[in-house]
Amino acid sequence: MPFQPALLIAQIGQAEPPSLIEVFLQAGPSAWIVAGILIGMSFVSWGIALAKWNQMRRAERASAEFLEAFRGSQRFSEVGAAAKQLAASPLVGLFQAGYAEIDSQIKINRGSEGSDYRIRSLESLERTLRRAVGSELRQLSKGTTFLATVAAAAPFIGLFGTVWGIMVAFQDIGVSGSTSLVAVAPGIAEALINTALGLGAAIPALLAYNYFASRLRQVRAELDDFTLELMNLAERNFT
């Protein structure tokens, strides 16, 4: 029979092994459960990351506008009116807490002594502002704990899928008595794909968590600076 290159190429093409994804689609339920968990964690972490990024961006823009209004106003009442339009800023919550405490102390002092606009305790005002700082930071940090959890847990969940896939591969070798690729392919596919999914979920979550942790430290510094600014104004004008 004469040599036929075209026929040989066609036979080689027909013998091409299935892809890793095609083999994984034939994997057992354990592989699908692990993959489903990792994919779900990845989707949730991406959703949280995008939502927090948008929240941080709006807060930064609103804080810049609020500081401009605050430093350009002569009265706290004017700042309070501007603050209603800039509620996304954590500085607004801090200002409102401090303003409410100052107003409360002034009313109590005037009612008991009939004196001018004075406050009784700067320490009480400082405690109020510190509580407000903690409240604003907790509000901004909501969801970041989940990102840290995904970054820490996803590789280990993927490792579990990897170990399980290798166990399946050894079991297939024992059943078939063959170490060929066809015998071990399903187990190896489970191992490799679950490893990739674990890293694919963990790495973006880790990067996002570190980014937001850095942004929160900056916000904390801004809140502390604004606390000192409010304390200085209160001491100059209300004591």
Image (cartoon, rainbow, N blue to C red):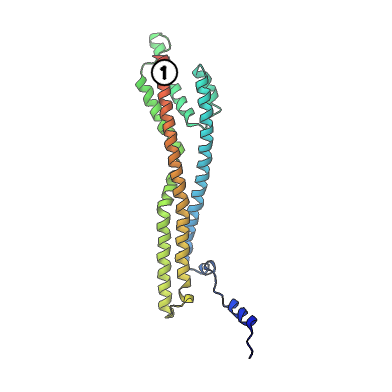
Q: Amino acid at mark 1?
A: Ala
Taking the spot 44% from the left edge, 79% from the top edge, the residue there is 176
In this view, the residue farthest toward the top is 114
Q: Is residue 143 visible?
A: no
Q: Is residue 217 visible?
A: yes
Across and down, in percent, residue 128 comes to 39, 26
Residue lying at 40% horizontally and 54% vertically, measured from the top left: 153
Percent across and percent down for residue 149 are: 41, 49
Quadrant into which the N terminus falls: bottom right
Query: What residue is disc 1 on?
Result: 234
Q: Nearer the viewer, residue 113 or 153?
A: 153
User: Image quadrant of residue 228?
Assistant: top left
Q: Front-most of 136 and 6?
A: 6
Q: Secondary structure at mark 1?
A: helix
Provide residue 81's location: percent of width, then percent of height.
54, 22
Give the image quarter of residue 117.
top left
For the image, the number of numbered tags is: 1
Quarter holding the C terminus?
top left
